Image (cartoon, coloured by chain):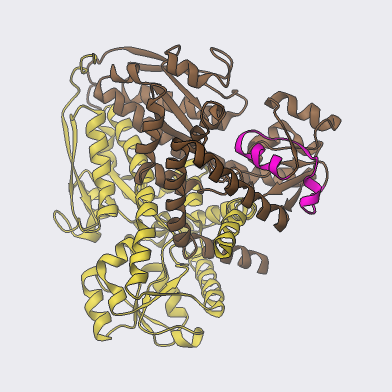
Chain colours: A brown, B yellow
Amino acid sequence: AALPARAEGPVIKWRLASSFPKSLDTIYGGGETLAKRVAELTDGRFEIRVFAGGELVPAFGVLDAVQQGTVECGHTASYYYYGKNKALALETTLPFGLNTRQLTAWVLADEGMRLLRELFAEYNIINFPGGSTGAQMGGWYRREIHSLEDLKGLKIRIPGFGAEIFSRLGAVPQSLPGGEIYPALERGTIDAAEWTVPYDDEKLGFHKVAKYYYYPGWWETGTHLVFYVNKDRWAELPPSYQAAFEVAARDAHLSMLALYDAKNPSALQRLIAEGAEFRRFPDDVLLKAYEAAHAFYAEESARNPAFKQLYESMMSFQERADLWWGVSELPMANLRQALRRKR
Amino acid sequence: AALPARAEGPVIKWRLASSFPKSLDTIYGGGETLAKRVAELTDGRFEIRVFAGGELVPAFGVLDAVQQGTVECGHTASYYYYGKNKALALETTLPFGLNTRQLTAWVLADEGMRLLRELFAEYNIINFPGGSTGAQMGGWYRREIHSLEDLKGLKIRIPGFGAEIFSRLGAVPQSLPGGEIYPALERGTIDAAEWTVPYDDEKLGFHKVAKYYYYPGWWETGTHLVFYVNKDRWAELPPSYQAAFEVAARDAHLSMLALYDAKNPSALQRLIAEGAEFRRFPDDVLLKAYEAAHAFYAEESARNPAFKQLYESMMSFQERADLWWGVSELPMANLRQALRRKR
């Protein structure tokens, strides 16, 4: 027979503002996993209600809402706040940067968390990794990209660092909310659009109007989501409730990647069956994008000390981590692809 | 000001038998992470004391001890119990099988957990993923392996499935506990030995007596550790303590991989500085090993329904997952290696 449930702790009710719509169940589900686990860990006495993007505050207003205490916590992607300080975007991903496992290792087991918490303290926020999509795709194109020349004048829906780099390659980046992308692509108002990974891209139906699906998605090499908590509200929690939030966030981080890794493969098969055609970006595009990215990082580092500090720490970690990757995961993965082709 | 700590739950004290020595701090630390988190989540009222391999029960006696209730829980690797049922080894890793992220996805977000829990129920055990090393190395060799011919008669310390496959390639696998490997390698009693990953291999000093360090470690493509809990003891826990154990185990799983990913790169650099030489296994060795592995899986599947069920589920998942890997993580990782060489 089970022992009796333990006695009561304080009842605490928080609201979590998500940047995501419920339709994107895996990414939105990160907030729900957090809330469910926190409730289980506290016999339901620490209750976190999850609100989809736009319900309480605008989808891209989560940082402001948490900073100002409009809500106690949020679930978002830090690169949405690129306009405040480009250093914030490094919490999410960096073009040609760390892959998901490396980014998680840099945050949890190297100096990433300490440096990021110093940055977020300026916003009265404490941050926790809040899930990952893994490496993303390079988006949907109405026509094939054969060389750098084909990027000239290309109208592509892409935000943040990716837009900065595409612009330096001669493309014309567009900023469009999720719901406006499909009609613009269908009408030909734009030539291409990037979103995330097959499981989510499939829901938005881009393959029906732009069949070329490009890889690798070099501007999102291992995208992290994040939980934000207002520091004053955090300080009011009993230690075991703080532990509940922190460990529940770890579970949400782990679980989201597992869900994407389990769902993307089947979505990929369905997209292929419906006519999507996979293409690798040409080498000259990849090389020029890499050079443009590093030129941009040098410029930003020269004018932004917060960016410089995070960027240099990540690059130093990546240099070592890629050496290890090159004799472990990578040769094994290449071998498996070769054996698969042989069958 | 902080709210008051919540009132008391029942005081519960458990013992955790680890299979690992304290000297292997990252892998042993999985048990400590679990215990620390469970204590934080329950205001110290659910206490798990961690005992190193051999302290309470033999290092490879953890399954028996948990099954019999000698201890309430354990931290181990299921392939140690290969002799009881080869299906148990599939919980840990499979030669040429899923990588770490894929294995975690299969367990947490596909049908892996359900199938594994059915298997462990036969031992009165409930299992939780308990950390990962990532892809391992292929071990240390006193002389170079130029072709399949060089494996004939090679005395190599290797356990489990790996031993089975090496034996089919003409090698002579040896079973030696960790502490006896170095002297045997130094004296030339054995020609080669595999252990795990650079951070742990370095501690055992193999590079001083066998400088060729081979990759990829095709028999451990993403090794999972595991927590075992006696099912009767589990049923006695209050729901919030069950949640505490489960979520703390998730954190231990995530944290161990992050720690290895952060520590292996520096260990690799130190090993190179001390004279270790990296070599890739020749193609004919890899191909014959792959064929031998699959012959063995077919034989084992024919005589062992539990093995067959798990194996087929993993292979079906891998088929889909590798297709996705081939247009996401893999091309990005290959690109980064190419760019690194270009600099």
Percent coordinates x, y for residue B332 in the rendering:
60, 54
Can residue A207 be seen from the camera position used here? yes
Please indicate whether residue A337 sits to the left or right of residue A192 in the image.
left
Percent coordinates x, y for residue A175 in the rendering:
70, 28
Q: For this rendering, which residue is in front, B60 or A84?
A: A84
Q: For this rendering, which residue is in front, A320 or B324?
A: A320
Q: Does the magenta stretch include residue A156?
A: yes
Image quadrant holding the C terminus of chain B, namely bottom right
How many numbered dots are placed on residues in this image? 0
Please indicate whether residue A20 sits to the left or right of residue B8 in the image.
right
Please indicate whether residue A241 sits to the left or right of residue B295 in the image.
left
In the image, residue B15 above or below residue B47: below
Please state the extent of the stretch shown in magenta in the rendering: A144-169
Which image quadrant is residue B209 in?
Answer: bottom left
Q: Does the magenta stretch include residue A280?
A: no
Q: Which residue is drawn at 59% across and 47% down?
A: A295
Image quadrant holding the N terminus of chain B, namely top left
Percent coordinates x, y for residue A96 in the rendering:
57, 49
Please indicate whether residue B124 sits to the left or right of residue A287 in the image.
left
In the image, residue A160 above or below residue A99: above
